[in-house]
Image (cartoon, rainbow, N blue to C red):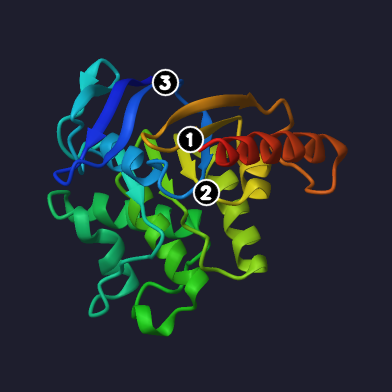
Amino acid sequence: MLSLNGLSKTYGNGVQALGGFTLDVPRGEILVVIGGSGCGKSTLLRLISGLERPSRGTVVINGETVTEPHPLINLIFQEPRLLPWLTVRDNIAFGLADLPAPERDRRIRLALGQVHLEGYEDRLPKELSGGQAQRVAIARALVTQPEVLLLDEPFSALDALTRAALQNHILDIWEESRPTIILVTHDIDEAVLLAHRIVVMKPWPGHIVEEITVDLPGRRDRDDDGVDHYRREARALLGSSLASA
C-alpha cells in the first residue's frame, strides 16, 4: 500500500506546486494522473520517489515513511537519460553493483525480456531508436524489482505507433508482476486505455478535483463504446478544471 498524506510542496521562490494532496494507492493498481501544466504532476512523482522532500505531509510505503530514494520505488522520466558511453547492458545494470554477478546477469536478462530487447545488450544508446531507448529506461527501472513504478510522461516524445507499442509493454509488465503503477500523462486516450483509476488535478496549488474509476477489462480497444464513455468523462472533467483554474 502506498499512502500520500497531506502532501504539500512550496519551493524557495514561494511557488506552492502542491497543496494538501491525500490519496491511498492499493498494491497493483494502475493510477493515471492528468491535469494542466503547472498542476504539480511531476512534483508529485518526485515526492513519491524520494527525490524531493515535501514541505508538509508524508509518503508512506508498507508502513515506512519515504524520506529519500527508496529501493521499492523507481521513476521513469520523459527522456530515457541513458549514459551514452555505456552499452544497453551496462545502462540497465547501473544500479546493481552490489549484487553478485550471477544475480545481476539474471535480472538483466529478465528485464531485457520484459521489454523485448533480447540481443541488444551490446549496443550503445546512439544505435537505438527513440522507442528502443525508452524501453531500455523501462528495463533499468524494472531491474531493481520495484513495488511502485512511477512514469512521468515517458511516451510523449514518441510517434503514435511506438507509443501504442510501449503502452502495451507496460500492460505486459503489469500482468506479469502486478506492480503499483502511477503514470502522469497529458494524453486522455492513454489514461483511459491503461488506468484502473484516473485522478484529475487542478493547479495553484496542485490538488485533486475528481477521481474516475475505469470499470473496463485490462486490454482495451480504443474504439470500444466503454472507452469512448470514459474518454468523454475524463475530457469534460479536465476541461472543467482548466476553465476554472
- Which residue in the structure is indicated by mark 1? 202
Which residue: 52% across, 26% down? 209
Vertical placement of 20 versus 173: above or below?
Answer: above
Q: Residue lying farthest top?
A: 63
Residue 21 is situated, as x and y percent measured from the top left of the image, at 37, 25
Label 2 Cα crowd, 10 Å radius (few <14 / some 14-19 / many 20+)? many
Left or right of 71 in this view: 112: right
Res 123 seen here: no
Label 1 Cα crowd, 10 Å radius (few <14 / some 14-19 / many 20+)? many
For the residue pair 225 and 239, the one nearer the viewer reads as 239
- Which residue in the structure is indicated by mark 3? 23
Q: Amino acid at mark 2?
A: Thr
- Which residue in the structure is indicated by mark 2? 185
For the residue pair 206 and 189, the one nearer the viewer reads as 206
Which residue: 42% across, 20% down? 23
Which residue: 49% across, 34% down? 201
Of the two numbered discs 3 and 1 in the rendering, the one whose residue sits closer to the viewer = 1
